[in-house]
Image: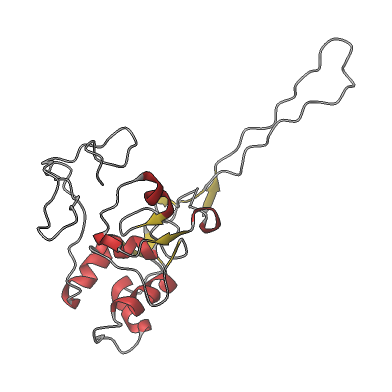
Amino acid sequence: PTRPIPTQPTPHIPMGCGSSTAPVAAVPVPAPAATVDLSAGEAVNPNPPNPEEHQRRACKYGAGCYQRNTKHLNQFVHPGDRNYRKGFVTFASGKGPEFQTLFQCFTYFDAEESGYLDKDDFVDLCKHMFQERPSPFGDFDEAWEDASQKGLHLNFSRFTVWSDPLGFGLPVGLDNPNAVRPCRFKFSGKDGSRCSCAQLEIGEDGFLCACGHK
């Protein structure tokens, strides 16, 4: 069963003495609240991103991009960025998504940020992951039943268990919050030197390291 969370009624605003019949000032009506699916035990994201408002192009350098200027980061998306999701990112001809971790792969196909994949999302994921390697499954229906245990949705935890023996060759991609996170910036050049920051320190913009790098 679902239970909508009630919204606040539109208040009446009096117009002052002698103006009881005058029109009441317009007051914005709050947007409908999220519907909580009690049977699932948690709420679906009430404000999923809108592809039409947030669609951007994928950077042609992908995960290997070294640019850090704000204009570039606002114009292009890279693996791991929030808008690097199915329907939100466009690719140049002959290009497609790339993933460094299983978590990036899962979130790319979870376009609504629900924390789950439905069967259609999962089939799209399989088409991408098995395009260069043989699939051990007869068809995508069989793969879905195996991954979801004949359920309606697939969460990330179950996805990692399912994908482990398939040899995708990707780390899980969930950081230990207590682990040291060195700056990932790599300078251009043959020596491939990197920024000397030993610990990522988020700067004032909330995205870049205090040193100015990603």
Q: Position of residue 66 (x, y in %)?
A: 25, 54
Q: Position of residue 188 (x, y in %)?
A: 19, 56
Q: Position of residue 145 (x, y in %)?
A: 33, 78
Q: Position of residue 23 (x, y in %)?
A: 85, 26
Q: In front: 40, or 114?
A: 114
**Residue 47 makes an appearance in the image:** yes
Residue at image x 23%, y 62%?
101
Residue at image x 81%, y 26%?
24
| Residue furthest to the front | 189
Image color mode: secondary structure
Q: Quadrant of residue 156?
A: bottom left
Residue at image x 28%, y 42%?
208
Q: Would residue 143 appear left or right of 30 to someone viewing this image?
A: left
Q: Would residue 26 appear left or right of 156 to someone viewing this image?
A: right
Q: In front: 31, or 1?
A: 31
Q: Relative to 210, does residue 182 appear above or below in the rendering?
A: below
**Residue 144 makes an appearance in the image:** no
